[in-house]
Amino acid sequence: MDKCQSYALTIRPLDGVTDEQIASTLKWVKRTCDYYHVITEKTGSERHIHAGLFCKNPKTRSNVVTELMRLFKDLTPSEKSVLRQGLKVMYNGDFIKNYLAKGDDTVVVESLLPEKGHMESYFTPKPSLKVKDNRKSLYYHELERMWYEY
């Protein structure tokens, strides 16, 4: 799997995120990332964390998930599953500009974002669909090329 530097994160425990979980998340984010934007959304048992992360070093998604599992080892298996699914690669700034600014009892916990031009350097290009080249298709392409040639 490819290493990336920008990730979108959602942490949503069943009973809502606690202040201690927010503090430990922020401590991990500051240690791991050059830049970040961390918010909480909603209140009470629906309160959860969203974050845009710009890592210091490129990491695979699975490595980031492993770090988060160590950080949140007290979560139930279903909460850990939501945490795993809540980590996505950020391909552009839309998550930060649009999704994190939707205003659903949103509180900005902490934010340190780079200038727009510098932010773009952290994004991974979207993967393109790769055509699988196998021997048969190469053989038929060669036959087609020869057909047109002769």
Image (tube, rainbow, N blue to C red):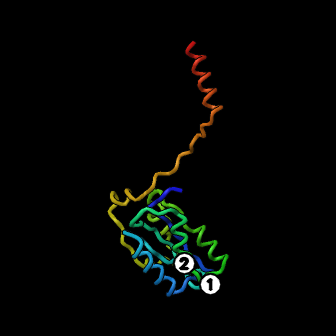
Asked whether 130 or 135 is in front, the reply is 135
- Screen quadrant of the N terminus: bottom right
Q: Where, by quadrant of the figure, is residue 86 drawn? A: bottom right
Residue under the image location 44 percent in, 60 percent down: 93
Of discs 1 and 2, which sits in the foreground? 2
- Given the current orientation, which residue lies at the most extreme front position? 135
- At label 2, the amino acid type is Arg
In the image: residue 85, left or right of residue 103: right
* Alpha-carbon span between mark 1 and mark 2: 20 Å
* Up-down relation of residue 4 to residue 52 (above or below): above
Report which residue position mark 1 lands on: 15
Residue 105 percent location from the top left of the image: 51, 78
Q: Where, by quadrant of the figure, is residue 139 drawn? A: top right
Residue 88 percent location from the top left of the image: 54, 63
Residue 127 percent location from the top left of the image: 52, 50
Report which residue position mark 2 lands on: 70
Asked whether 113 or 7 is in front, the reply is 7
Asked whether 82 or 32 is in front, the reply is 32
Residue under the image location 60 percent in, 84 percent down: 74
How would you rate the neighbour count of disc 2 (Cα within 10 Å): few for under 14, some for 14-19, many for 20 or more? few
Residue under the image location 33 percent in, 59 percent down: 118
In the image: residue 125, left or right of residue 14: left
Asked whether 17 or 24 is in front, the reply is 24
* Up-down relation of residue 124 to residue 134 (above or below): below
For mark 1, give the secondary structure. loop
Residue under the image location 64 percent in, 72 percent down: 81
- At label 1, the amino acid type is Asp
